[in-house]
């Protein structure tokens, strides 16, 4: 990756970081909201629910807009809105106002993750895109561990509103980075100008795009189901200290970051599809091992065994995440903006659905989580042949043909 390419992509990486920060930095402030803003604990939780609901919907909205208008201009406008919403949240006088403003903030924040894949697709060939998307994934993996610690310090030192002032400052820094580093981009070339619904319908008909994006979505969903359930299982069900979960999360995050950043080198040496398949196999072996551990050796359950069982899964998803995104975008043709939004929406929706399904069964132990991880891993593997199996040109994207299915030639999306 050249220095020029990195500088071109840096504002996008910052925008994605700012978007993800809007939840993780804010979490430590939730317990004190009822006492300072009125309302109750349920209202405080609604500030999270409102954010996530608008954030999910925003993936589809900004994905559609990205195929009609200049993507950098859209992202800059969204960052301005995010900054304004963050300042308004910091000044909120009651819980209901904060809930409404968090919905606005979530919608604006969604642009950072929805547009990132499409903008990064412009940076170069598939090898470059794999590296850049892997960098974004690494940031998204590290933030849940780092941001709450920073948020807790801010809340203690400066009060709950300080977290929103920091979010606003991060948005300003990102805007300055766009002005200093990003090159202007004309609207994407799409002479037929299909509407948003038509673009999503086109994507749903693209067999190979859907294969890559759904396979990645189920893989991601299985990991998130485990991560979301792990605190309860380790601390409440198994009675381990919180430090056990913290150490486990740290090990898994570091492992993911390393494997994600090695993905680019692996795709240089092997085919992209080969790396994706290898990552999928690791994921399934790990999921099966976790289920065997839960069923056969319940006395071994704990932070150490959880970590060892899930390490191959984390390595596998780290390996396949960047290549899978790059490969899916390759088959999206001129609809890369909508494709990026749809991929983020699918991954978040599947993760949320899986988490909700296993939640009522956590009181009985980790079996429901292990079954969910296995099921989602198996489905991810079963879907993958739809993407990597060679098909006739007319079954692929009408705007992007892959002459060598196992080793895509470098492409550059014309803007």
Image (spheres, rainbow, N blue to C red):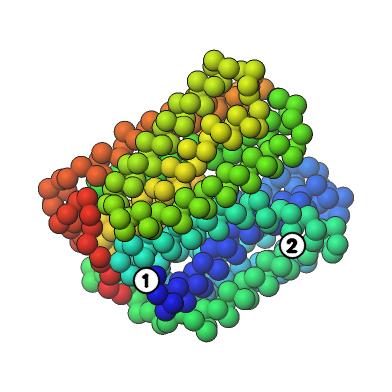
Residue depicted at x 23% and y 68%: 192
Q: Which residue appears farthest toward the top when viewing the image?
A: 296
Q: From this view, report whether residue 103 is shown above or below residue 230.
A: below
- The residues tagged by marks 2 and 1 sit, at their Cα atoms, a distance apart of 33 Å
Q: Residues within 10 Å of mark 2 (few under 14, many from 20)?
A: many
Query: Residue 196 lies in what quarter of the image?
Result: bottom left
**Is disc 1 placed on a helix, strand or loop?**
loop
- Report whether 204 appears left or right of 93: left
Q: Across the whole image, how many numbered discs are drawn on residues?
A: 2
Camera-side residue of 38 and 123: 123
Q: Which residue appears farthest toward the front when viewing the image?
A: 269
Q: From this view, report whether residue 181 is shown above or below residue 227.
A: below
Residue depicted at x 77% and y 34%: 241
Camera-side residue of 395 and 365: 365
For marks 2 and 1, the one nearer the N-term is 1
**Is disc 2 placed on a helix, strand or loop?**
helix
Q: Where residue 370 sits in the image (x, y, percent)?
A: 52, 26
Q: From this view, report whether residue 118 is shown above or below residue 215.
A: below
Residue holding disc 1: 123
Can residue 222 be seen here? The reply is yes
- Mark drawn on residue 163: 2
- Report whether 252 appears left or right of 241: left
- Report whether 407 appears left or right of 180: left
- Report whether 171 appears left or right of 62: right
Residue depicted at x 30% and y 55%: 269
Q: Which residue appears farthest toward the bottom when viewing the image?
A: 180
Q: From this view, report whether residue 163 is shown above or below residue 321.
A: below
Q: Quadrant of the C terminus?
A: bottom left
Residue depicted at x 51% and y 67%: 13
Q: Residues within 10 Å of mark 1 (few under 14, many from 20)?
A: many
Can residue 198 be seen here? The reply is no
Q: Quadrant of the N terminus?
A: bottom left
């Amino acid at each position: 990756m050249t220095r020029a390419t990195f500088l071109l992509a840096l504002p996008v990486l910052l925008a994605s970081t700012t978007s993800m920060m809007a939840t993780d930095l804010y979490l430590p402030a939730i317990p004190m909201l009822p006492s300072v803003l009125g309302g109750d604990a349920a209202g405080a939780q609604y500030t999270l629910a409102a954010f996530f609901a608008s954030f999910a919907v925003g993936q589809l909205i900004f994905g559609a807009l990205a195929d009609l208008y200049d993507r950098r201009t859209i992202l800059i406008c969204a960052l301005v809105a995010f900054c304004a919403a963050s300042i308004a949240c910091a000044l909120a006088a009651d819980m209901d106002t904060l809930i409404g403003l968090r919905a606005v903030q979530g919608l604006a924040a969604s642009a950072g993750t929805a547009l990132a894949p499409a903008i990064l697709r412009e940076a170069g060939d598939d090898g470059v895109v794999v590296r850049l998307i892997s960098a974004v994934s690494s940031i998204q993996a590290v933030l849940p561990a780092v941001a709450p610690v920073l948020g807790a310090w801010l809340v203690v030192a400066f009060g709950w509103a300080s977290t929103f002032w920091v979010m606003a400052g991060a948005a300003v820094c990102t805007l300055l980075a766009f002005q200093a580093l990003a090159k202007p981009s004309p609207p994407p070339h799409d002479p037929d100008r299909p509407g948003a619904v038509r673009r999503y319908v086109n994507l749903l008909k693209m067999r190979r795009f859907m294969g890559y994006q759904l396979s990645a979505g189920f893989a991601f969903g299985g990991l998130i189901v485990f991560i979301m359930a792990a605190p309860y299982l380790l601390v409440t069900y198994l009675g381990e200290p919180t430090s056990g979960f913290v150490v486990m999360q740290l090990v898994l995050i570091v492992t993911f970051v390393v494997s994600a950043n090695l993905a680019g080198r692996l795709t240089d040496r092997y085919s992209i599809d080969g790396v994706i398949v290898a990552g999928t196999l690791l994921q399934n072996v790990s999921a099966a091992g976790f289920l065997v551990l839960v069923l056969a050796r319940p006395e071994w359950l704990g932070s150490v065994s959880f970590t060892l069982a899930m390490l191959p899964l984390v390595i596998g998803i780290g390996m396949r995440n960047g290549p899978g995104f790059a490969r899916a975008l390759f088959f999206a043709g001129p609809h890369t903006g909508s494709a990026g939004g749809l991929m983020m929406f699918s991954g978040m929706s599947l993760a949320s659905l899986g988490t909700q399904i296993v939640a009522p069964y956590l009181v009985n132990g980790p079996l429901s989580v292990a079954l969910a991880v296995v099921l989602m891993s198996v489905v991810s593997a079963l879907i993958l042949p739809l993407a990597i199996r060679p098909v006739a040109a007319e079954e692929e994207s009408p705007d992007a043909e892959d002459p060598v299915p196992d080793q895509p030639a470098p492409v550059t999306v014309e803007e």
